[in-house]
Amino acid sequence: MKNCPGLTGAVFEIPAFRKTVDLGVSLLTETDEVTDAKLQQACKNAADAGDEDTIRAAKQSELDERMISGLPESNEGSMSIVGVCPACAGDAHAAATSGHKRKCFRAGGVINSTQVSGDCLGSSVLAVCVVDRSLAEHNDAKAPAEEQP
C-alpha cells in the first residue's frame, strides 16, 4: 500500500473496556437515536482524564460478540446493559416509538450472544464505555512490565 499515493497502512483498533455508567432512558418512548445519544453522552460525562476525546459507548454488536478487551464476563451491575445501534433491535413492540424493544444483558447475566435478551424496555440502564486502541497500544497494555534490577 505504501507504493500507492494517498494510501497508508491499515490501522486496526480494538475497543478496550473502561467502565459502566448508569443512566435514565425511556426505551419505550425514545427513538433509537435519542437513546444512543444518551448512552454516548453518559460515557463522555464519566470519562477519566486522558479519555475525554476518545471514550464512547460500546456498540451492541461489540457486546454480543465480546469484541471488547477487558470486558467483564458478566453484568455485575444492578441494571441491564444496553449497547448502541446498529444491531440493537430486540423483539417487535408496536407501542415502542422505535417499533421494537432493545437488546440487553440482564443484571447478573453473562455477556455474550447466547445470553442477550431481546425484550428490554427499562428506564434505567448501564452503558459500557470503551476507548479504541490501536493494535500496538493493545499489545503494549497486555505486555508484562519489565522487571527492574
Image: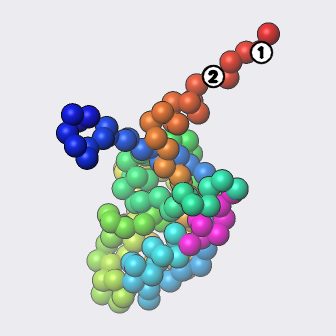
SS for callout 1 = loop
Q: How far across and how far down the image is residue 73, in percent?
A: 53, 44
12 in the magenta segment: no
Question: Which quarter of the rendering shows the N terminus?
Answer: top left
First to last magenta residue range? 41-48
Left or right of residue 47: residue 80: left
Left or right of residue 39: residue 32: left
Residue at position x 56%, y 30% from top? 140
Q: How far across and how far down the image is residue 144, in percent?
A: 63, 22
Front position among marks 2 and 1: 1
Check disc 2 and report the residue beneath it: 144
In this view, the residue in front, 107 or 58, is 58
Q: Residue furthest top?
A: 149
Check disc 1 and report the residue beneath it: 148
Residue at position x 22%, y 43% from top? 5
Q: Is residue 128 visible?
A: no
Q: CA distance from mark 2 to mark 1?
A: 12 Å
